[in-house]
């Protein structure tokens, strides 16, 4: 089959309470997050975090349009979920990138299973382990 095009796909990334779904299709390298272009994402540190898999992939990222929908969690959790979803999408397109991503940062492909500990009944406002302050005298 001559001129066979690679199809798009959907991948997910997770971090804490944040979940990101990346939809990929052949294109010119446009990345949108919740409908906004990646270049408009603030703060800059978050934008740089999200761009890491795109910079590692170089050529492969220029051949795909990526649309990411993210919800839940905070800014950094969402950024980590987005970068994971993008990295998984790029691997679907080019299997040779997997080794590069693992060498750079394993969390690009493997979700972090750590979660916050639930609050205990007697201390619902103070946290899971903190006790009531006691006076010595």
Image (cartoon, helix red, strand yellow):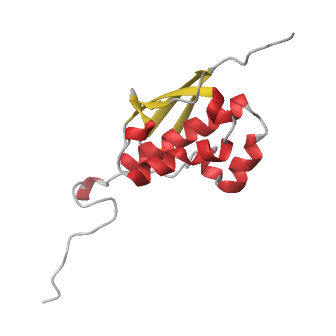
At which x and y percent is residue 43?
35, 50
Q: Which quadrant of the figure has residue 97? A: top right
Q: What residue is drawn where x is 55% and y is 48%? A: 113
At which x and y percent is residue 122?
24, 57
At which x and y percent is residue 17?
41, 42
Residue 3 vertical placement versus 71 (above, below): above
Farthest residue in the right direction? Answer: 1
121 to the left or right of 111? left
34 to the left or right of 28? left
At which x and y percent is residue 36?
38, 30
Q: Can you see residue 16?
A: no
Farthest residue in the left direction? Answer: 137
68 to the left or right of 59? left
Farthest residue in the bottom direction? Answer: 137
The N terminus - image quarter: top right
Q: Residue 57 versus residue 125: which sits nearer the camera?
A: 57
Q: What residue is drawn where x is 69% and y is 48%? A: 101
Q: Can you see residue 49?
A: yes
133 to the left or right of 31? left
The C terminus - image quarter: bottom left
Q: Which quadrant of the figure has residue 124? A: bottom left
Q: What residue is drawn where x is 37% and y is 39%? A: 40
Q: What count of labels does the image hold?
A: 0
Residue 18 vertical placement versus 126 (above, below): above
Residue 80 vertical placement versus 11 (above, below): below
């Amino acid at each position: 089959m001559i001129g066979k095009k690679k199809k798009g796909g959907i991948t997910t990334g997770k971090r804490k309470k944040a979940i990101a779904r990346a939809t990929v299709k052949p294109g010119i390298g446009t990345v949108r997050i919740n409908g906004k272009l990646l270049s408009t994402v603030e703060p800059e540190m978050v934008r740089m975090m999200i761009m890491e898999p795109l910079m590692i992939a170089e050529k492969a990222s220029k051949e795909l349009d990526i649309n990411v929908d993210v919800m839940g969690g905070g800014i950094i959790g969402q950024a980590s979920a987005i970068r994971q979803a993008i990295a998984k999408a790029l691997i679907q397109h080019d299997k040779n990138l997997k080794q590069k991503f693992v060498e750079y940062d394993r969390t690009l492909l493997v979700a972090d299973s750590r979660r916050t500990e639930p609050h205990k009944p007697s201390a619902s406002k103070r946290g899971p382990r903190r006790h009531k302050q006691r006076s010595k005298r």
